[in-house]
């Protein structure tokens, strides 16, 4: 069964021809099945081949740097399901979600300041705690 195209938003479609699925044996416990069936699936795609602008490609490289090899290949692996088909679907969906998240434009953070009322409230609370502790002290003449 061939891989499906990825819809990564803003009308951008990554054709299945740019994706490559590689299967291998899963690790961990699982009895006889795990020793003879290749259920782990790794989906790979070359970042430079993605149908994106240079800026968007740079954003993908920056945000997914930990998943991209030196050769520029983006890899997503799944081995949590029992079948190769289910793992392939899961890895494909994860790759699609990762690319979508990487391409999302993040709002620029505006630095904020502590208001005068917030400062006054904090200092007043500190005074109240200090007074409470002062009243708890016993056996001392002040």
Image (cartoon, rainbow, N blue to C red):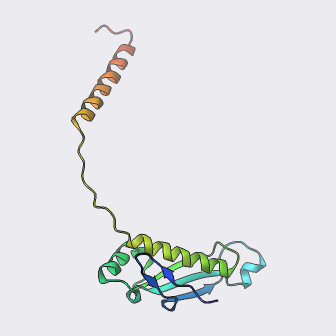
Q: Return the x and y of residue 103 as percentages of the image width and height.
A: 38, 73
Say whether residue 15 is visible: yes
Quadrant of the drawing holding the N terminus: bottom right
Position of 141 relative to 118 (above/below) = above
Q: Nearer the viewer, residue 13 or 32?
A: 13
- Callout count: 0
- Residue occupying the far bottom of the picture: 17
- Residue occupying the far front of the picture: 11
- Horizontal side of 117 relative to 36 (left or right) equals left
Q: Residue at x 46, y 85 (%)?
A: 14
Quadrant of the drawing holding the C terminus: top left
Q: Residue at x 36, y 78 (%)?
A: 61
Say whether residue 26 is visible: no
Q: Return the x and y of residue 124 as percentages of the image width and height.
A: 28, 25
Position of 130 relative to 113 (above/below) = above
- Horizontal side of 24 relative to 112 (left or right) equals right
């Amino acid at each position: 069964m061939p891989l499906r195209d990825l819809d990564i938003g803003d009308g951008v479609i990554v054709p299945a021809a740019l994706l490559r699925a590689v299967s291998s044996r899963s690790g961990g416990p699982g009895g006889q099945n795990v020793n003879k069936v290749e259920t782990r699936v790794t989906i790979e795609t070359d970042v430079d081949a993605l149908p994106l602008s240079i800026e968007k490609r740079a954003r993908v490289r920056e945000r997914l740097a930990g998943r991209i090899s030196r050769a520029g290949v983006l890899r997503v692996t799944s081995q949590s399901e029992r079948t190769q088909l289910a793992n392939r679907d899961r890895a494909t969906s994860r790759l699609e979600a990762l690319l979508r998240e990487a391409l999302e434009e993040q709002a620029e953070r505006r630095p904020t300041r502590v208001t005068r009322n917030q400062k006054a409230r904090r200092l007043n609370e500190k005074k109240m705690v200090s007074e409470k502790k002062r009243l708890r002290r016993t056996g001392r003449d002040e």
